[in-house]
Image (cartoon, rainbow, N blue to C red):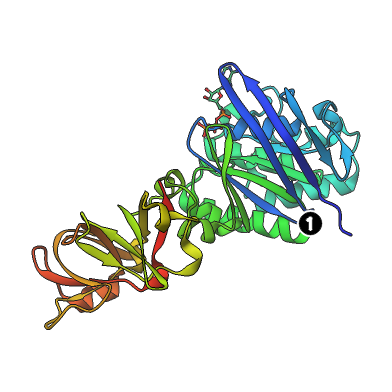
Amino acid sequence: MSQDLLEVYNLTVNVGKFSLKDINFSMGPGDYVIILGPTGCGKTIFLESIAGLRALNKGALFLNGKEITHLPPEHRYLGFAYQDSLLYPFMSVKENILFGAKARKMAGGPEILRRMEQLAAAMNITHLLDRYPRFLSGGERQRVSLARAILTRPPLLLLDEPLSALDQQTRHAMQELLREIHHTEGIGIIHVTHDFSEALQLGKRMLVLHDGQVEQEGEPLEIFYHPATEFVAKFLHGENLIPGRVLRQGGEQWFEYGDGDFLLGPLPKNCLTEGLSESGKLSTLLIRSGSIRLSRAAEGPAAANCWTARIKSVMIGSTHVDVYCNGNGRWQASLSLAEWQGLDLRRGEQVSLSVSPEHLHVIAQ
Ligand SMILES: Nc1ncnc2c1ncn2[C@@H]1O[C@H](COP(=O)(O)OP(=O)(O)OP(=O)(O)O)[C@@H](O)[C@H]1O
């Protein structure tokens, strides 16, 4: 039986008025886990608790089956890269990168120097090795911090927004490098980010934190299309969130909104929080903007899950176009630039909007 790399039981940490509350979590040796959440939800405190930089008020931590709850940080041998780098100002870049290895009495050998040079080359910081941190840009400091955290091949790497200061091109290159390091070296990674597209690029698993608690856990795309709560839906920019009620008709369930004037469905079997249709409770429908089809206004009787609307505004991006429409509510549809050009539509024109039932997702309020 393969052992978990990290097990977290009922982790509770109080810092001033803030608390991380009863977090339970485990990950295998090769897992890449994303921690996502708004500012102040406790992402850094969570990483710091695992690293041993914050004492637990309650709970226990195990690394490779061994309890580390009370072990000092330097005996946990984890890698940690902070968002703001935290490099030692009186050490050169090279000395900073080698610092962790030195603390573990690994420095000096040709092998560790070769690895340092390889990492520096991969991160494009070879030319900076003799510089001091104050003469580096924010993005350069982040790359040095990452090289320092990875150098000793820790079993678990904790990354706190490690790519936030990088321009888009360097960020993509570093995401690629992180993926490669994770793949080839089998290092487990917990990566904190605000950026959902980064979560999609890197993580197979994601924890969404909210106010010190785990709000939802799962695969990033699954959470994107099927958020468990309104908070998660809104945090992941749920474009079309419509208040209404779930109705049972025959053996099927439908979503009624707009004071009972409109119906969408039947709802897919897997999208409901239990008992919603029986209780008649207010709930919220989510339709992702990419799941709404937009076409020139159709003639003839309206089909199921198809309605007429008028284009209110259009936002043209480099790869896709967001079209905002009014009709049976307010809607945002997202099209590829090529699709939009093919339709040749303007603001104020009438369009048909439609959605397939499998793209309807209901959240309890
Ligand atoms: N030393 C401290 N004393 C009191 N409160 C603190 C202390 N350190 C952090 N906090 C508070 O704990 C909460 C969680 O902080 P944390 O840094 O973990 O948030 P975060 O999710 O990492 O935020 P961000 O995305 O902005 O980095 C915040 O409200 C913060 O103000």
List x then y, in percent, for residue 40.
51, 30
Residue 300 in the figure: left or right of residue 216:
left
Q: Nearer the viewer, residue 311 or 303?
A: 303
List x then y, in percent, for residue 244.
30, 53
The residue depicted at 47 percent of the width and 52 percent of the height is 168
List x then y, in percent, for residue 353.
23, 70
The residue depicted at 42 percent of the width and 56 percent of the height is 278
Residue 159 in the figure: left or right of residue 137:
right
Q: Name the residue that disc number 1 marks.
A: 185
Q: Is the residue at mark 1 in contact range of ligand 1, meaning its CB lies under 8 Å from it? A: no
The residue depicted at 63 percent of the width and 45 percent of the height is 191
> With respect to residue 221, does 138 lie above or below?
above
Q: Nearer the viewer, residue 361 or 142?
A: 361
Residue farthest to the left? 348
Q: On the rendered image, what quadrant is the N terminus found in?
A: bottom right
On the rendering, which quadrant does ligand 1 occupy?
top right
Q: Which class describes the residues within 10 Å of circle 1: few (<14), some (14-19), or many (20+)?
A: few
Q: How many marks?
A: 1
Dot 1: element:
helix
